[in-house]
Amino acid sequence: MKEMAAYLMLVLGGTESPSADDVTKALASVGVEADADALNNLISELDGKDLGEVLETGSGLLAKFGSGGGGGGGGGGGGGGDAEEAEPEKEEEVEEAPPAVDMFGGGDGGDY
């Protein structure tokens, strides 16, 4: 798969028909080792073929499989139709903290 990805990137980069060496160098430039057997198989399969036609044929084959499970359905619609409105949330009363006492124990405003 990595060989195919590198091959396609080389084609997108302007190389019409990348060689096995081109693909190996591209993969090595990012620290990935190419599988020689897979790469030789890929090059031989694509040799002399127009990549656009190969992709079009593959796309047609994939269309025969359908689109899979269809994904999940939408979320539920909620209560819907209830004549009674929900009660508004009650705000919790916040207790006020007692006044802070200064560090020296007094708060009467007198001299120390």
Image: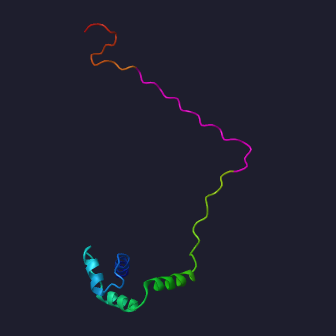
| Figure quadrant of residue 83 | top right
Front in this rendered view, residue 37 or 109? 37
Which residue appears at 59% of the width and 71% of the height?
A: 70
In the image, residue 92 lies at what x, y percent?
Answer: 53, 32
Q: Is residue 85 magenta?
A: yes
In the image, residue 110 lies at what x, y percent?
Answer: 30, 7
Q: Quadrant of the C terminus?
A: top left
Tell me if 70 is positioned left or right of 39 in this view: right
Marker count (numbered): 0
Residue 25, relative to residue 72: is it above or below? below
Front in this rendered view, residue 80 or 49? 49
The colour scheme of the drawn protein is rainbow
Residue 56, relative to residue 45: is it above or below? above
Q: Is residue 53 magenta?
A: no
Q: Quadrant of the N terminus?
A: bottom left
Front in this rendered view, residue 74 or 48? 48
The overriding secondary structure of the stretch rendered in magenta is loop
Which residue appears at 31% of the width and 18% of the height?
A: 102
Residue 55, relative to residue 91: is it above or below? below
Q: Bounds of the magenta span?
A: 80-98
Tell me if 55 is positioned left or right of 109 in this view: right
| Figure quadrant of residue 43 | bottom left
In the image, residue 76 lies at what x, y percent?
Answer: 64, 57
